[in-house]
Amino acid sequence: MNVTEQSQLPTSNIIQPSLSVVAEDWFKYLVKVHPHHTDYAGIVWHGTYLTWMEEARIECLRSLGIEFADLVAAGCNLPVIEASLRYHQPMRMGMEAIVKTRIGDMEGVRIHCDYQIQSLNGEVLFLTGRITLVAVDLQNGKVMRRLPPNMKDALEKMR
């Protein structure tokens, strides 16, 4: 999606038409900084980035055919067990950005997701990060021995 097409989209926290898995294997998710995302100085609070990353991850999974609610209803959860973030530039109230996510390495039931949050034109990098998830059986609260086959197949599409 080019900058002209992006500027024609309605603005909100989540702009649905921007959700896509792109040729470079990044899923793109558009966000806009609203007052409740910021601290008293009008700069995005650090926890907001984690929320946006989770929203992008859930929508990325949905684009691969994995509805998170269905996954949980089937007895599987994907809690975050590790998070690493690097803040490059602050974002301020009113700005829009693209949250890019992709499935990185998968080690058994560990799934690593990589992130970049950047300006709409891609010229400013605000944040880079990596989240590690693990598949947990909700019934017994233990780490699963393997990913459900349909989930593993869907995640492989993005790698």
Image: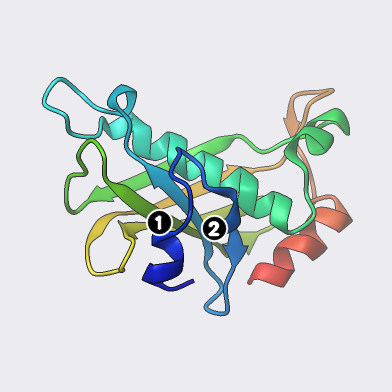
Which residue: 79% across, 46% down? 145
Q: Is residue 35 above or below residue 129?
A: above
Foreground residue, 9 or 97? 9
Residue topped by disc 2: 18
Q: Residues within 10 Å of mark 1 (few under 14, many from 20)?
A: many
| Mark 1 touches mark 2? (CB < 8 Å) | yes
Q: Position of residue 53 (x, y in %)?
A: 46, 44
Which residue: 33% across, 31% down? 34
- The chosen color scheme is rainbow
Which residue: 54% across, 37% down? 80
Among all residues in the image, which is located at the extreme left? 41
Residue topped by disc 1: 98
Residue 89 is marked as: none
Q: Position of residue 52 (x, y in %)?
A: 45, 40
Foreground residue, 53 or 32? 32
Q: Quadrant of residue 12?
A: top left
SS label for mark 2: helix
| Residue 71 left/right relative to 83 | right
Q: Earlier in the sequence, mark 1 or mark 2?
A: 2
SS label for mark 1: strand
Q: Choose mark 1 or mark 2, whichever is in front.
A: 2
Foreground residue, 67 or 121? 121
Q: Position of residue 13 (x, y in %)?
A: 45, 38
